[in-house]
Image (spheres, helix red, strand yellow):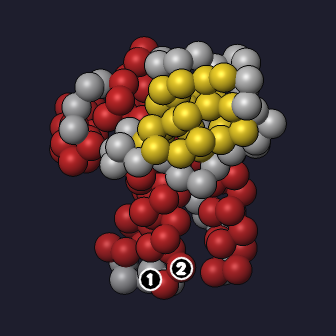
Amino acid sequence: MAMYEVGDYIICRNGGVWRISQTDSNGSTIVEHESGMIKIISADSDEIVRKIVSKETILEIVDRVGYIRTIQAPNDKTRKEFYDEAMAKYNEIDWIKVIKTIYLRQKEKKLMPYEVTYYEKARGYLHSEISVLLEMPVNKVEDYIAAAVSNDSW
């Protein structure tokens, strides 16, 4: 826990972007970015995955959205395993892979019921992180990404 300081934004295993509001010898008090919900986690907890990336990094990633490949799987069982693996990495590129894959499958009307959960979780992580870094409301992030991707089109 010592590597995190008050004011740091972090990614938590059980969902979303949180800000460390207070630390002491027993652990940290964290506040969820979107809802303002407060949680206390112990110093030895593995709940915190990492700090969020830098603003420069997220801008580079958003610039690359159109070039990030989707997840290809021969069947639903394997696809679900790929989603699990991608989500367990807690990184933006893998979240985008999940989001793009499910978005395209939905457009093709091939969506499995479990995919909605993966979509919402990946989207929640990515959009919350972008919201913090670019200081925009989370409900504006999708439009921001869409505009950034369409600006790349030739």
Q: Residues within 10 Å of mark 1 (few under 14, many from 20)?
A: few
What separation in Å lies between label 2 and label 1 (alpha carbons)? 12 Å
Residue 33 drawn above or below residue 84: above
Q: Nearer the viewer, residue 35 or 114?
A: 35
Q: Residue furthest right?
A: 44
Is residue 153 found left or right of 60 in the rendered image? left
Residue 78 drawn above or below residue 17: below
If the image is split into quadrants, where does the C terminus sit?
top left
Q: Which residue is mark 2?
A: 114
Label 1 secondary element:
loop
Whether residue 74 is visible to the viewer of this picture, yes or no, is no
**Residue 15's spot in the image, x, y percent?**
53, 52
Residue at 35%, 43% in the rendered image: 36
* Quarter assignment of residue 31: top left
Q: How many circles with numbers are drawn on the protein? A: 2
Q: Which mark is residue 25?
A: none
**Residue 118's spot in the image, x, y percent?**
52, 65
If the image is split into quadrants, where does the N terminus sit?
top right
**Residue 104's spot in the image, x, y percent?**
39, 66
Q: Which residue is mark 1?
A: 110
Is residue 65 found left or right of 97 in the rendered image? left
Whether residue 80 is visible to the viewer of this picture, yes or no, is yes
Q: Amino acid at mark 1?
A: Lys
Residue at 73%, 18% in the rendered image: 2
**Residue 81's spot in the image, x, y percent?**
72, 68
Q: Are marks 2 and 1 in contact (CB under 8 Å)?
A: no
Q: Nearer the viewer, residue 61 or 123?
A: 123
Is residue 78 found left or right of 59 in the rendered image? right
Q: Residues within 10 Å of mark 2 (few under 14, many from 20)?
A: few
Residue 142 drawn above or below residue 148: below
Q: Amino acid at mark 2?
A: Tyr
Q: Residue furthest front?
A: 25
